[in-house]
Image (cartoon, rainbow, N blue to C red):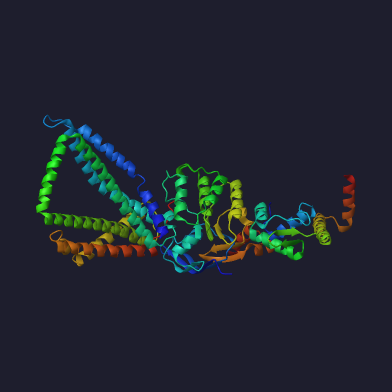
Amino acid sequence: MEFKDNIPIYLQIKQYLYRQIITGKLQPGHKIPSVRELAVELTVNVNTVQRALQQMNAEGILFTKRGEGNFVTEDTALLEQTKAKLIKAELEKFVQSMNALGVSDDQISVILSNYLIGE
Amino acid sequence: MSIFKSLFSQQFKQKTKNLYLILLIEFIGSIAITFFSSRYSYNSSVLDTFMIKLLSIYSTIMIFSTFAFYIIICFINEKINLSQTWRLTPINDSLFYISNILSSFVTMVYFKLLELLTLAIFSGLYYVISPQVRTNVAITLNELNKYTNSHLSKLYNIFDETLIFITIMVLLALLTYLIISFLNFTSRAIMNFLPHVSGRGVSSIIRLVIIWLIAWLLVKISNLIRMNNIFSGFMVNDKSSLLIILVLLILNLFFLIVNVFLMQHYFEAIEKK
Amino acid sequence: MDNLLEIKDLTYKKNQKIILDKINLELQPGKIVALLGENGAGKTTLMRIIAGMAKNYQGSVTLLNETKEAMRKAHLSFTDGLTGFGDSTKIQDIVHFYQVIYTDFDDEQFDQLRSFMKLDLNMRLSHLSKGMREKLIIALTFSRKADLYLLDEPFSGIDAMARKKIINSIILWKADQATILISDHFVNEIATMLDEVVVIKDKTVLTHQSTEAIRTNNLSIEEYYEGLYLKEDE
């Protein structure tokens, strides 16, 4: 997994795990890979993984079962909220990119609809 | 202490690596030399000439090999003292240095014992093959027996003197090695202190000069303490011999302590690239 | 948390030149720390001092509250060029040396690392390419269960693919409380793995930062490092 070196790694790990959860690769109520497994899989430091997981635990997306590891929450509302946040972040990025290309906010929805129809 | 044992065994293993090859060369070499240089006289048998020549050649080899091996061991010792691979061993420098010396000493003794064993085998072979030798040995043992019974005290004397002689030789060999170490350590320490000079061989020359200077200093100091007088009484009588042994012990201890101090504080380990 | 390594006012001179001047450094357990600096800045010297190979310095070096060299050496593992062995030495014999000399040497771990790096026990030192030799050194260094690992440019002869694999295995095998201090020019390859960065410049420690703090400012480690040198060019 290639992480950018100029954004805090733990944030990127969180993003990665959010996506895994939203896209269903990590199921609600199921256990996620251990800290060590994640570290190896993502080629990152164990400390960084721990920091990311700690925050996600605090946010409620993950919960710990003593001696068993970290599990994805079954709180559907929270999951929907997280999904909404991710989508919003993507939209923000998209809008910013379009603006940078000289497309104003009004033009965006038109261009987008045309594009989708044309598919 | 277990680290000391481990280090000792590894150093011993390193030093005896080529030992068996050397012994084999000596074995075959001595037989070959004897074979190719035998002149056959008409009086004694071929066998006698061969065996006597073999025993004397092998004994000569033994004497020369002692010096040669001693020099080789000195080089190996200093190489180990300098090597980062060895100095990373989790043991303090004094024990490291002592282990190095001890393993060299044991290697030397082991080497000589194996050579003596070979000599004994040759002699035993001669004894078994030649009836004349058997007769001569029997006569000699008989005479020795008679002599022993009547001159027991003299025998003890000879035994004592041999022991003293060996002790002095060992202490001298040890002292020589310690002084070699001393020259190595001090010259390197001084080289590390002086500004670096570039140019091939220049630093080696400077180092040699430093070694000569220190050696000269040592000689001057020993003259001052009147070492010569003490050694002039060598083997004259028991008292003077014991005095020599005492002096040698003190000198050995002195240089051992100094060398350990130098090693702990100034003699760095390097990774020869 | 007790410091794993404490270096106080370390000054080291050689050949009438000051190499390190009043170095102060503290390392915590369980961190992966990069030691950066130009060639000749003193990174290797610093590691040699910590490992007890360089002598005659001022200041103190304490590892796990021990200042005695023998105790420090027992708790650290330093990448050694294996120059103490003759060219004809078999890897097998080198391993035997490590097994005997170091009580914390883990045979199983070495076996895993060895097969991972495709090293044959019967090969002789002289037959190894530079890259293979470095792989062997890394395998030997990490087969010891030490508290501090000192890696001095461990990857210089190893190709990029192999480097990634080896770094992966290091993460896998490192004990949680063990600290790695690694000096290498290929910062980028290991950047995402680092907890902290120590920069040696002008004979002393210029900065000691956590990598996440650097990244919070939207700088990559390389950008940050180069930035330190640009400042002086201005």
Would residue B266 be visible to someone looking at this image?
A: no
Residue at 9% across, 53% down? B150
Of C149 and A103, which appears nearest the observer?
C149
Q: Quadrant of the N terminus of chain C?
A: bottom right
Q: Quadrant of the C terminus of chain C?
A: bottom right
Using the rendered view, name the quadrant where residue B221 is placed. bottom left
Q: Position of residue B197 (x, y in %)?
A: 39, 57
Q: Position of residue B39 (x, y in %)?
A: 16, 31
Q: Is residue A1 above or below residue C88?
A: below
Would residue B35 be visible to someone looking at this image?
A: yes
Q: Position of residue B88 (x, y in %)?
A: 44, 57
Residue at 55% across, 51% down? C109
Q: Position of residue C20 (x, y in %)?
A: 48, 65
Q: Is residue A38 left or right of residue C142?
A: right
Q: How many marks?
A: 0
Of A100 and B93, which appears nearest the observer?
B93
